[in-house]
Amino acid sequence: MTVTTGVVIVAPSHDEHAIAVRDRLTARGVTATVVDLGQFPDKLSISLGTHPRTITIGGKRISPTAVLVRDLGPTNDFAHSILLRWERLGVAIYNPVSSVVTKPTQLALLTVGGIPVPDSLWTNDPAAVRAFAAGRSVVYTPLAGGATRVLDDVGQLELLRREPVCFQEHLPGRSVRVYVLDGAVVSVTEPGNEARVRGLTPDLRDLCVRAASVLGLRFCAIELKANAAAQLKVLGLDPAPTFLDVDPRVADALVAALQFSSSGSAD
């Protein structure tokens, strides 16, 4: 069976970021393939042999030189097994599945790593929230994501017992998004108007690089927000951020990194 090499982009087949990266790599002469693992098992066949390199997807033997993970689709053991095999084989993966963790785990790891994060509480216990919110302004957001709102009525907390919610100290200052790739800051923007921000201090650049390193992320967007004292704190790291309409330097840097990783790999 013929072995297909090159860059593999794990994403839904319609993902515009995946398509754009594939097309840019192709224009540079790099073989790139979008693999939609979310189609397994109904529309995609996968076979795994006992040797870690024996991976057949859609009837093709796949041996990537670099991997970009945009979206695994519905969680399944096969998808994880494939990526974990590639990770153990030393393939450059942006980002390894072992580095993609839930927000409570993210912020806990960042805290241990000395990264400033907002004081946070994930709970379905109204009493715990009342103690957490005592004497300060608090915001909350659903665990699955959604709008962030200021907690203004602790009397409604009995509804919380149905589902846990994330509560955090209110950070009223400016927001900044920082893109980190392979240990370097490649872009800094202000969410909303997507304007580039200048003057990020060396200390903040170092903080963002360290945050990505703590979680083991090779590529990510870091959301920061300032408290009342203008100190920026890390809200979270997105391991599969949008970037096409943000700053062209992000896409250029990512494509170049995948091309470099691919050219430096050997089957």
Image (tube, rainbow, N blue to C red):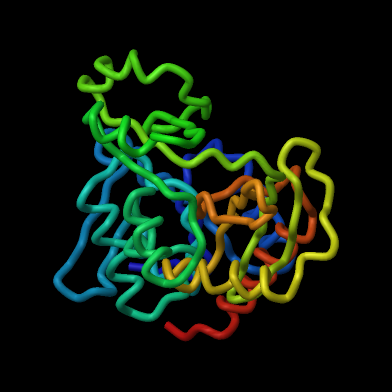
Decide: is 183 above or below 253: below
- In the image, is 48 to the left or to the right of 19? left
Residue 48 lies in quadrant: bottom left
Decide: is 118 above or below 181: above
Count numbered badges in the picture: 0
Viewer-proximal residue among 242 and 51: 242
Viewer-proximal residue among 89 and 228: 228
Residue 19 seen in this snapshot: no
Residue 178, percent from left and from top: 67, 58
Q: Going 58% across and 49% down the picture, which residue do you hit?
A: 241
Q: Going 27% across and 30% down the picture, which residue do you hit?
A: 164
Quadrant the N terminus occupies: bottom left
Residue 99, percent from left and from top: 38, 63
Decide: is 107 above or below 39: below
Q: Going 73% across and 76% down the picture, which residue do you hit?
A: 202
Residue 181, percent from left and from top: 61, 68
- In the image, is 251 to the left or to the right of 90? right
- In the image, is 91 to the left or to the right of 235? left
Viewer-proximal residue among 246 and 139: 139
Residue 114 seen in this snapshot: yes
Quadrant the C terminus occupies: bottom left
As drawn, which residue projects farthest toward the left?
Answer: 50
Residue 156 lies in quadrant: top left
Q: Going 80% across and 38% down the picture, which residue do you hit?
A: 193
Residue 199, percent from left and from top: 83, 65
Decide: is 94 above or below 35: below
- In the image, is 217 to the left or to the right of 254? left
